[in-house]
Amino acid sequence: MSRDSSLPPLKVRVIDEPPLLEVPEFFDDPNSYSPDVPIAVDFGSNQLRAGLINRATPSHVFTNRITRFRDRKLMKTMTFIGNDVNLDQAVRAQSKSPFDGPMVTNWDYVEDILEYTFNHLGSTPNNGISNPILVTERLATLQTQRSSWYQVLFECFNVPGVTFGIDSLFAYYQNTTANSTGLVIGCGNEDTNIIPVVDGQGMLTEAKRINWGGSQAADYLTNLMTLKYPYFPTKLSNFHYRTMYEDYCYVSQDYDEELKSFLKLDTLESKNVVVEAPFVEILQPQKTEEELRIQAEKRKESGKRLQEQAKQKRIERLIQKEEELEYYNQVKEQLKDQPKKKVLHILQNSGFDDERDFKKYLYNLERSLKKSQAANEESGDVEEEDVNEHKFDLVEVPDESLTEDQIKEKRKQRFLKASLDARKKAKEEKERAAQEEEERKVKEQQWREIDLEGWIKDKRRKLSNLIAKRKDKLKMRDEMKDRKSQMSQNRMKNLATLAEDSGRGGTKRTRQQATIDNDPNDTFGANDDDWTVYNDVTQYPEALEELIEEGYKEIVELEGQLLEHDPNFTEEDTMDAQYDWRNSTLHLFLRGPRPHDSENSHEQHQMHLNVERIRVPEVFFQPTMCGEDQAGVSELCERVLLSKFGASPRQMSSITSEMAKNVWVTGGNAKIPGLRERIVKEFTGFLPVNTSFNVNISSDPSLDAWRGMAKYAQNETDYKKSFISKKEYEEYGPDYIKEHKLGNMNYFE
C-alpha cells in the first residue's frame, strides 16, 4: 500500500517501563519528628500516602507494592517496598500488592509496608510507635478487615490509638466546613462511591457504590486492546495499559454523538493516538551495487548447476523406469499360455500376490512413466542444441543388433525425440491459442461496435461474478487461517482420519500396492479418498492464493475495458477504490488515518487508541457497557437528590438543594479529563429547571483524603471522640468500633 505524501506524519508516543531509580526512598529529618503528632496513613490499593499531620502534604507517597527478592549469589532474601522496587528491573517484575481487589488479603505485607513507612517517617517500630494513627478505609468495610488492622497496629506496633474513617468523607471534610451539607463522589482505584452528607455527617444508609475504579478501567482497556490486536508482537504490562488510560483517555461530553463521527478521517486526524511498544530493531547492513551484482551472479550460476543436476536425475529415473517397464513386459509375455499355478508361482517370486496385483502394478508404472515424461516435456529440460547433436540414428534399430551401451543410448535418444515432438506440439498449440485469442478480440470488437450497450451489460455481469467469487475465496482463506472455523475443523478431521487409516498397517497386498514412485511403503493415493484430502490440504495457502491473484488480474482487466468504453464507469467504481483504506472503517479503527505498511517494524509494534479513549471512561455513566449490572453515576446522584430526604422529581427539598450546591468529586480516578464537565451536564439534565448547583474538584484530588485526615486530627473535639486507644481495644476486643461523622457504622458489620 503506497504512502500518501500529502498527509503529515502522525505523532507516535513510545510507552516504556518507568526509569529505574538511582537512589532509594529518602528518610525524613529526625529533628523534625515529633512523637506526639498523629501520623495519617492513606492506605490505598494503588498508592500509599503517609506523613505527620503538622505538614501540608504527605511526606511519603509511593506505590503500595512489595517484593521479596532472593539473591542467589548472596544467598539472602531482601525486601523492597514502595518506590524502592524500581531500583532493579528483576525486583520490579516480582512486586506484589497486599490487596486482592478491594480487600487486604496479605497482612504480612501490610506489616512490612507499615514498618517501612514508620522508619522513613523517623519513628522506631521496634520499640513501638508513640504516635496516634489515622487510617483510611473503604465504604462499608467488613468487620474482619478492621479487626486485622487492630491486631497489626496494636499488637505489632504497639500504637497508643487509632482512628478509622472513609477516604471519600475525609476528602469532603478537607474541601468544606465542618458541618456543611453536600454530596461527595469518590472515584477510587477499586470502586466509585456516592455519599450524601448532612451537617457534616455521612448518610451511609443512602450511600451508593459502583464496582468501577481505576483498576477496573485499566483492565477493561487491556481487554479491549487485546481483542483489537490479538497478534500484537509484544506483551504489554499492566503499567503500560494504566499509563495509556491515565494519559490518553477522557470523558466524552456526548458519547453517542461523538461515537458516530469518531472513525471519520477528519476526526481521527486530531483524536487518534498512536502508541508504540519498545522493541529492538534489527538493521540489515546495506550492500553495494557491486556486492549485489556478484551475489546475483552466484545465485544464477548456482541455479543453473542445480537445474543441470535435476535434469540429469530425471533422465536417469526415466531410463530406470523404462528398463523396469520393459522387464515386466517380458514377464508378462512369459505368462502367456501358462497354467495358472505356474503363473502364480512366477508372480510370487517377483513379489506379487496374484495376477491382479501384478496388472495393477504394471498399470501404475506405465501411468507414472507417462506422467514423468509429460512433466519433463513441459519443463523444457532438453535444449534445442542438445537435440541437434543427436540424429536419433538408434531409435529404429532393433535391440538385438545393438550392444548394451547402444541400448542405453537408444533409450536416451527415444526420450529426447519424444521431448522434441512434445515441444513442437506444445508450440503449435500455443500458436493456435494465440490465433484463437486474436480472433476472439476481433469478434468482441465487432460486437462492441455493433451493440455497445449489450457489450457493457455483459462485461458488468462478468465483473460482478468475478468480484463475488473473489469475496468467497477471501472468506475461505480467512476461515482456513482461523483454527476455530468450521472449515479448519473439517480439514483437521480429514487429516486425522487419514493418519488413523495409515497407522493401522495392513495385509501384505496393502503394503505392496504400487505407487507413483514405486515405493511399496507409500500407499497414499491408492484410495481415491486420499486425493480428496490432498486437494483439501494443498488448497491453502499456495493454490488458493494463486486463484485469488488470477481473479484479481481478470477483474483489473475487465475494469480497464469498462473505464475505456463505458462512460458511466469511473475510477470510483473500481474494486481498488471501493477497498481503499480511506473507505474502510476497519482500517481506520485498527490503523488510524494513514495507510499501513505491514513490512515496517515500527508500525507492527504500534497501537491506535481512538474509540477506546472515550469508551473506557464512559463506564462511569453506563456500567452495563463492561458487564456491570448497576446504575451509573448520574442515575445514582439523581436518585439521591430527587428521591431522598423529602425530595421529589418535581420539587427538591431544602436538604437536597443544599447538597446540589456543594457537590465534590474526589479520588485519584477523578483526574480523568472531562469528568467534572460531564457531571455538570448530567446534573443539568435531570435537575429541575433553574436549580442552582455547583460541582467542585480540587487541584489534586488524590491527596484530598490525606489532607482531610490531617485537618480532622487538628480538631481535637471531634478527633478525640473517634480515637480508639489500646486500652479500649484490649478491653472490648477487635470488634469494637467508635462511630463518628466521617467513619463507618455498626450497621455494616
Image (cartoon, grey):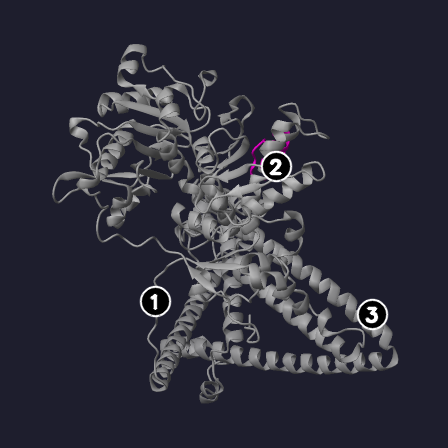
In percent of width and height, residue 646 lies at 65, 23
| Callout 3 amino acid | Lys
Q: Nearer the viewer, residue 217 or 723?
A: 723
| Callout 2 amino acid | Ser
Q: Upstream in the sequence, badge 2 or badge 3?
A: 3
Look at the numbered disc 3 and give the secondary structure of its residue: helix
Q: Is residue 467 left or right of residue 287?
A: right
Q: Residues within 10 Å of mark 1 (few under 14, many from 20)?
A: few
Q: State the CA–CA distance, disc 1 to disc 2.
A: 51 Å
| Callout 1 amino acid | Ile
Q: Upstream in the sequence, badge 1 or badge 2?
A: 1
Q: Is residue 590 left or right of residue 61?
A: right
In percent of width and height, residue 716 lies at 35, 26
Q: State the CA–CA distance, disc 2 to disc 3.
A: 59 Å
Q: Is residue 558 left or right of residue 739?
A: right
Look at the numbered disc 1 and give the secondary structure of its residue: loop
Q: Nearer the viewer, mark 3 or mark 1?
A: 1
Residue 282: which numbered mark, if any? Answer: 1
Residue 269: which numbered mark, if any? Answer: none
Q: Residues within 10 Å of mark 3 (few under 14, many from 20)?
A: few
Residue 457: which numbered mark, if any? Answer: 3
Q: Are marks 1 and 2 in contact (CB under 8 Å)?
A: no
**Is residue 106 visible from the viewing direction of this image?**
no
At horizontal 45% and vertical 47% (from top left) the residue drawn is: 699
Quickly name the residue at label 2: 634
Q: Quadrant of residue 508?
A: top left
Q: Are marks 3 and 1 in contact (CB under 8 Å)?
A: no
241 within the magenta span: no
Name the outermost residue toward the right: 450
Boundaries of the magenta span: 624-640
Q: Nearer the viewer, residue 672 or 78?
A: 672
**Is residue 153 visible from the viewing direction of this image?**
yes
